[in-house]
Image: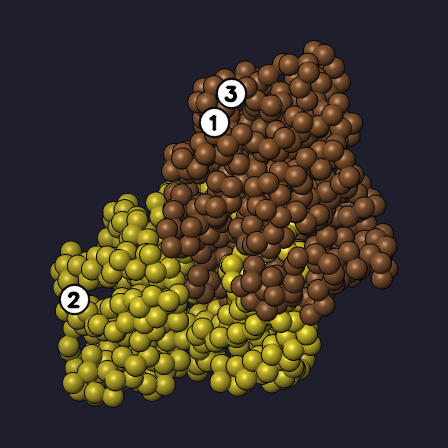
Chain colours: A brown, B yellow
Amino acid sequence: MPAPAEFLKFIDDNASKFVARLGAAVAIPSVSGDGSHRPDVFKMSAWLDGQLKDLGVTTKLVDLGEHKMDGQTLPLPPAILGRIGDDPKKKTVLIYGHYDVQPASKSDGWDTEPFTLVVDEKTGRLIGRGSTDDKGPIMGWLNVLEAHKALGRELPVNLRFCFEGMEESGSEGLDDLIKSESAKGKDGWFDGVDCVCISDNYWLNTTTPCLTYGLRGLVYFKLTVSGPARDLHSGGFGRMVHEPMTDLIQVMSKLVAPDGTILVPGVDDLVSVADAEEREIYEKLDYSVQDVEDAVGAPITISNDKATVIMGRMRMPSLSLHGIEGAFYGPGAKTVIPASVSGKFSIRLVPPQTPELIEPLVFAYVEQEFAKLNSKTKLKIENLHGGKPWVADHKHWNYEAASRATEAVYGRLPDLTREGGSIPVTLTFAESLGVNVLLLPMGRGDDGAHSTNEKLDRANFIEGSKLLGTYLYEVGAVKA
Amino acid sequence: MPAPAEFLKFIDDNASKFVARLGAAVAIPSVSGDGSHRPDVFKMSAWLDGQLKDLGVTTKLVDLGEHKMDGQTLPLPPAILGRIGDDPKKKTVLIYGHYDVQPASKSDGWDTEPFTLVVDEKTGRLIGRGSTDDKGPIMGWLNVLEAHKALGRELPVNLRFCFEGMEESGSEGLDDLIKSESAKGKDGWFDGVDCVCISDNYWLNTTTPCLTYGLRGLVYFKLTVSGPARDLHSGGFGRMVHEPMTDLIQVMSKLVAPDGTILVPGVDDLVSVADAEEREIYEKLDYSVQDVEDAVGAPITISNDKATVIMGRMRMPSLSLHGIEGAFYGPGAKTVIPASVSGKFSIRLVPPQTPELIEPLVFAYVEQEFAKLNSKTKLKIENLHGGKPWVADHKHWNYEAASRATEAVYGRLPDLTREGGSIPVTLTFAESLGVNVLLLPMGRGDDGAHSTNEKLDRANFIEGSKLLGTYLYEVGAVKA
């Protein structure tokens, strides 16, 4: 069942208004990973809750308690549960999104203020932190709701919402909520849910829509080496004392090779080697080495072989070194011996890897490599957070509905992909509700979700809003 | 000739006022290494110039031109030249100091606001950025001038001053000024200078005054590895592309071993191995492994042998990794692949090493190690600044005068030391003027000059002001 023409027209006619709403959302710097922004995350929850209520959604803000971050005890931002529609004859779709964002500051290299949505008329880009990850998609759902309210049309399905404010910082508290709500059955907010739709990932390239049926897991580590009681002057103490930076860099250099091979024994070994048949799946995707180069803006792929590069994201684990906390990071030249430095790195996981399997491998190896240094500095290794990888049945009616909707809006069938990122909640929904979970991306592969100059193309925002609505009509038409 | 009793009494009687003046100096955040603070460096120059003029010093602010820092063209803060006294029968002493400071922010781990001088009545510490490096010593000279002005006493020597505002950032422009003023002879500001006194280093420990006759040189490198056009999300691109952090960490790990051995071939080899006789000199110094542990607040010396540890600072080169610019440095967990990262490291040099000898060794080695990685990222290595090491004749009358002054004020003869830090201007004065240069420290070994919670003990500030004045009387009494 295609979406009604008046719905599609309403989205087009109200595009400017929808962009303005996205701008209002981006303007709230709801950075969950920085304690000083916690009030902004709460502000964002209140703003979103207000929008949902205005559009007829019954909501509940669920207090998820508090947590410790960087020595502070902070209140967790609430989960927003919502429901609209209770027709037992209709399918019930659960929508997930997150209203928190990654850190961003102009000094990171942004061309514009990250928390001011800039509409670049020339390129059609909507630039700002959260534009594509994940405020744009959430606004997409609001756009669908607004269209139906304004047109006086009933939604083709019952909707349930679950929006969180800690996705970028490990989704603390959410798993327990989803499990307990799921276990409540008829008394829970997720009663009767037939499928889940999450719009929090991206097309492979900049032109081909896709549906995503797999995600890598993640385990994030903080590796701290401590020495003196305070920072020292390298002139005064260089070559008198063991330096934490020297030791940390030694250990960090043992984690991953320049070609991406993970050097922690046992980690890569858990994953099977792709055979010729499997390689062919990746060879066929509408994605090329050139697409990757275009997306990252430089010819730096780890291989010139298409399948190898794509499998690097879709079916291989990866280890990235993100940075060092506590060392000199500014411009200029500071001759400091930092007292305590923390290397941050994470490993993206694919089946059958899990955080529980990987953590002991990393801990043992890091401790062993540190011991080899014979240093008097102290080592501490922490697992900050993690999530298992996930793979879904892409022949389920939920995927077929999304495939038809994509064809209706974009005029072509979507690629079926597995994604390199982690949305741990995906697995929680799949396991707790026992229903099919679909990842239906709105943005393009070059959106730069966790990067500087994050953007969502205006076309993807508007056509993507149509896609979300059309998907609901296709689900509504599925035979029970 | 001992200093007059009324001078010493004046210093004691006006101690609170002197501490307040140091507080006013610390309150100006004259950070030369951060372009955003450049106006504060200028403010500091104007403040110091005003103080000198009030105390009867004829001054000239010398424009040193401009320089490029982090992509900006910035005006260099002026050198302040000063003169007071022109008696041909007196010796003429040239005083050097620097009015700029290292970067500091509370978030680095300071217990107090770094640019507010905190007087800790319990410990007697004066805590603030620049308290000991190098505003305290400059204030010491102002205290001496003020005492003589207030008491209506003539100074026992002619004084010349040279204060700069770029010491913490390579002393840009100063060398040329010193060389040209020195070359002017009778028309220059340094005409007739008999010796130089610099107070910009520290006692070895917390109890024994010292005179310093040697300094290590420095060469500071910035090692940049660049890959994608912008930061990437590790989920989206991990194991698809070469990551600059991976490659940078690999190269940085090849520079120095945990025990301090410099791994760049040829660097350590330039320095002779100490024989038994030379080791004995270091064995005899009033300094112990325990003193080092106390100064740094942890048992992390690279050896348990006293001479090895002391030689590590005084007669061996050292290589320290200071940090990384461009990577994730905040608290929390950010899953970024940084686009371009710059490792900062420096090598402290001892004779016969010079920046000119070391730079090609480092460049060649870094390029060779990077080439081994077989990565498509790009490498750039820069020499940000440097200075040669310096050793003076410690049997010169300038040192003997300072030795007698130390005995008069502190009741004990000073240790004779070589220092691990770099004050490149020392060598410039020695070479340009052809006179003896003395380093006469005011602060203690645990002051934390470039560190968090930098401090100067009130006792060192006050007794140190007496020492500077007494030194002038001892120089004044030296036979021509």
Which amino acid does the dot numbered 2 rest on? Val
Which amino acid does the dot numbered 3 rest on? Arg
Q: Chain of mark 3?
A: A
Q: Residues within 10 Å of mark 3 (few under 14, many from 20)?
A: few
Which amino acid does the dot numbered 1 rest on? Ala
Q: Secondary structure at mark 2?
A: loop
Q: Secondary structure at mark 1?
A: helix
Position of residue A249 in the picture relative to residue B323 (left or right): right
Alpha carbon of mark 3 to alpha carbon of mark 2: how far? Answer: 86 Å
Residue B200 lies, in percent from the top left, at 39, 65
Question: Which residue in the structure is indicated by mark 1?
Answer: A147
Residue at 40% x, 34% y: name it.
A14
Alpha carbon of mark 3 to alpha carbon of mark 1: how far? Answer: 8 Å
Q: Which mark is residue A153?
A: 3
* Discs 3 and 2 carry the same chain letter: no
Please state which of residues A232 and B233 is positioned toward the viewer in this rendering.
Answer: B233
Looking at the image, is mark 3 or mark 2 nearer the viewer? 3
Quadrant where the C terminus of chain B sits is bottom left
Quadrant where the N terminus of chain B sits is bottom left
